[in-house]
């Protein structure tokens, strides 16, 4: 069975995940349904169960845009990854789980909107369509164990660590095995080399030019791409875009966005600070 080395620098994007065997055929994607700093214990246990069972990466997916883009970049960098175990409970509004399923089933439109997603901003603006299409052909199956928003019952398959372990182990088998409604086994690496693509490098290249008014707006749009885009309002603005434009105009401080203090956003926060220092 074909197994290959991931690209140098794998995984290119930082995030809330743990790394396992880089020859593993499966990753565990746990939907994070809170924007609090602390990860809920029940979700943390799913990630650890996935990692213990042999997932190549086991981590959290929080948003339907930047979070999804980072996950895609990390997967296309490692051709050995062919399955995603999707678990946890759906996050209302952002609907990253639904968006991931829609992306696999229908892809993106010309404007990079995920076709069929009902999320707030299901737009993959920072990766080219070729990366999206590579992701869609590399992943053969999403093992969908996702629970409804608000579910707390750890007997539900998508919240049960033992079930996550079983799903991961099924993907490792040399011969097909039945896991729930899925027939799973390790089919070997995708037959094309891994791709190194890092979204932050692309975002920080886009510096604003033009008249002063337009410059602030352009910078605002660029900053917006790096903000968490949760529209939680903790900064005192009605949404992340309003905050980004105030940042660009010098009317707000980066520190007012407490969500950026989460480790997942370290790289984004540094890029934002760099952009603001270049004004
Ligand atoms: S910019 Fe404001 S609305 Fe957006 S994530 Fe930060 S605190 Fe929340």
Image: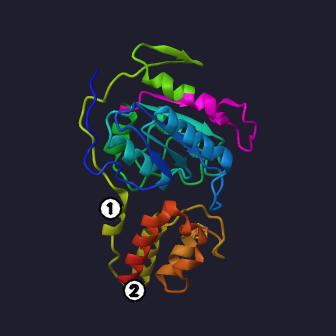
Whether residue 252 sits left or right of residue 195 in the image: it is right
Q: To which residue does mark 1 refer?
A: 202
Q: Nearer the viewer, mark 2 or mark 1?
A: 1
Q: Tag 2: Cα neighbours inside 10 Å, few (<14), some, or many (≥20)?
A: few
- State the image coordinates of residue 65 (x, y, percent, origin top left): 49, 53
Magenta stretch? Answer: 138-165
Q: Residue at x 49, y 44 (%)?
A: 114
Check contact, mark 2 vs mark 1: CB within 8 A. no
Q: Residue at x 66, y 41 (%)?
A: 89
- To which quarter of the image does residue 130 belong? top left
Q: Nearer the viewer, residue 108 or 20?
A: 20
Location of ligand 1 given as a quarter of the image? bottom right
Mark 1, secondary structure of its residue: helix
Q: What is the number of the mark on residue 51?
A: none
Gap in Å between the C-alphas at discs 2 and 1?
A: 23 Å
Q: Which comes sooner in the sequence, label 2 or label 1?
A: 1
Q: Residue at x 54, y 82 (%)?
A: 253
Q: Residue at x 42, y 65 (%)?
A: 267
Q: Is residue 263 magenta?
A: no
- State the image coordinates of residue 259 (x, y, percent, origin top left): 59, 67
Q: To which residue does mark 2 refer?
A: 212
Does the rendering let one see residue 117? no
Quadrant for the N terminus in the image: top left
- To which quarter of the image does residue 109 belong? top left
Q: Residue furthest front?
A: 52
Mark 2, secondary structure of its residue: helix
């Amino acid at each position: 069975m074909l197994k290959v080395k991931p690209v140098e620098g794998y995984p290119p994007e930082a995030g809330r995940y743990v790394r396992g065997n880089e020859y593993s055929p499966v990753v565990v994607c746990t939907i994070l349904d809170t924007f609090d700093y602390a990860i809920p214990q029940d979700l943390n246990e799913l990630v650890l169960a996935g990692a213990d069972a042999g997932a190549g990466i086991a981590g959290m997916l929080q948003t339907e845009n930047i979070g999804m883009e980072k996950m895609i970049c990390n997967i296309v960098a490692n051709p050995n990854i062919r399955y995603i175990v999707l678990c946890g409970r759906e996050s209302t509004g952002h609907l990253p789980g639904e968006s991931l399923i829609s992306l696999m089933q229908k892809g993106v439109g010309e404007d990079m909107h995920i076709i069929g997603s009902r999320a707030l901003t299901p737009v993959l603006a920072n990766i080219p369509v070729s990366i999206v299409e590579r992701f869609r052909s590399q992943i053969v199956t999403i093992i969908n164990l996702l629970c409804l928003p608000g579910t707390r019952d750890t007997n539900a398959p998508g919240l049960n660590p033992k079930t996550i372990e079983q799903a991961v182990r099924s993907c490792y088998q040399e011969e097909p095995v039945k896991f729930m409604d899925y027939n799973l086994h390790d089919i070997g690496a995708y037959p094309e080399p891994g791709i190194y693509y890092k979204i932050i490098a692309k975002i920080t290249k886009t510096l604003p030019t033009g008249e002063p008014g337009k410059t602030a707006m352009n910078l605002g749009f660029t900053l917006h791409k790096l903000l968490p885009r949760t529209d939680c309002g903790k900064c005192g603005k009605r949404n992340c875009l309003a905050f980004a434009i105030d940042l660009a105009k010098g009317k707000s401080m980066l520190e007012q966005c407490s969500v950026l203090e989460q480790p997942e956003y370290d790289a984004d926060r540094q890029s934002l600070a760099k952009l603001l220092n270049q004004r």
